[in-house]
Image (tube, rainbow, N blue to C red):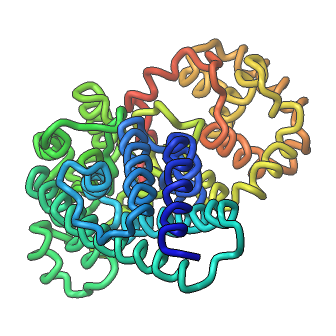
Amino acid sequence: MSADRWRSVRTTVAKRMLARHTTLAQELTSAIKARMPEFRKIDPGLQRTLDEMTRHVIQVTVGGLIDLKPCPPPPPTSPTLAFARRMGERGLPAYRTVLVGQIAQRWLLNRMLAELELALPEPASLDLVVPMVTWQLSCFSVLDDAVGEQHMMAQERTRAKVGGIAPEDVAFALEVAEDVDQIEALLHYVLDARHLGLVVWSQHGTVRGNRLVRIVRALRQLGPVDDVVVSPRDLVSVHAWVSLGGPVRQATTQISRALWTTAELRVSFGEPAHGLVGFRSTHYQAVAAHDVAQLPGSIGEPAVRYRDVAVTSLLSRHAGESQPWVLSVLGELGTECDDRARLRETLRVYLEVGENASAAATRLFVHRNTVKYRVARAIDELGVSFETNRLAVAAALNYHHYAIGDHGSNIAPGRTAALRGTDLGEGES
């Protein structure tokens, strides 16, 4: 095939693909989400940035197919670099950002080869295809370098803007270091104390300036807290530890109220523990509670404590097995309707307070006899014997409450008050 004929075919294919670049961009976005779980549930701002990036990559790459000229570095206004900056601000690793480009490269190459195969009058020889593949690889190499640089710069700006302890220093303290003096010097925080780990994040997916860390630092003013260390994950969330100088209940209540009423920030708590081991364990518990807080049944709850969701945290790691088991234990009680939702919530709270009808009535803001009536009905609808499966029933109810949820059901009139932190610390660790 002559050079002119080969160029004509590439031009035809490029124009055909560019004419439907919006559809191609949607397909590419779906391919990225299929490979990268962190993009399957993202806020509207990041979704827009991702969409703009995929459209831009297709336009530039497919447009360059005509002449196969070397690719210059993208300008700072490029949607691809804007995407890299957003990824850096969100605290996502640089290699994950580059991986997006690699997925796009492979997807686009396969799509262009398929389109060319349809347009060619005869199978393309390697001497035609190899230069095209080499050109595309070189273009994405230039793009990867620019993306990596923008990602790093965004992370540095975010760290300077937010303040606190660098994430890599926290990772070193959590996973590597064993010398307590070295860790204390690194974090400016005393480890010979009782620690409470927290994850604090924005309810709405964005926080202006360093408002988030200013609020967490304000925890120093609370009576139950002696010291605070904060490490930004990104512009919308932080990991934090407080050194407790008072009861757990008082600390969790004041912290959750202060964060929610001030800026509608959500918080998850680990369990209080002492020393370096406790510093690590309470953090991992807070992170696990944060993961549960992202499940459908927990969305909107300002505060979640690990002790309340430990069972759900364990079960949710094997959701494919856990949910069928939960529904089999609950039987008819697992049916989605307002009446069953009220019964589930009543039985769950009743078991949480040690099968004390009066305490459950106080938590649910109903009469004691109402609790007893609902509990009896709930037990009748279980899929297993309550007398011999109390632990299984409690675990199934806990998982259903946090992981599945009762959407749209007004199941507990007193729940709003509880969510503001009034009973997060019920009982002491």
Q: Quick check: 82 above or below 8?
A: above
For the residue pair 255 and 239, the one nearer the viewer reads as 239
Indicate left or right for 20 with 416 as reference. right
The answer to whether any part of residue 281 appears in the image is no
Q: Quick check: 194 above or below 400?
A: below
Q: Quadrant of residue 52?
A: top left
Q: Quadrant of the N terminus?
A: bottom right
Indicate left or right for 418 with 210 as reference. right
Q: Position of residue 362 (x, y in %)?
A: 55, 21
For the residue pair 351 and 58, the one nearer the viewer reads as 58
For the residue pair 297 and 311, the one nearer the viewer reads as 297
Q: Quadrant of the C terminus?
A: bottom left
Q: Quick check: 87 above or below 344?
A: below
For the residue pair 13 and 383, the one nearer the viewer reads as 13
Indicate left or right for 255 with 415 as reference. left
Query: Which residue is drawn at the image coordinates 66% and 45% (left, top)?
Result: 399
Query: Which residue is drawn at the image coordinates 27% and 25% (left, top)?
Result: 261
The answer to whether any part of residue 410 appears in the image is yes
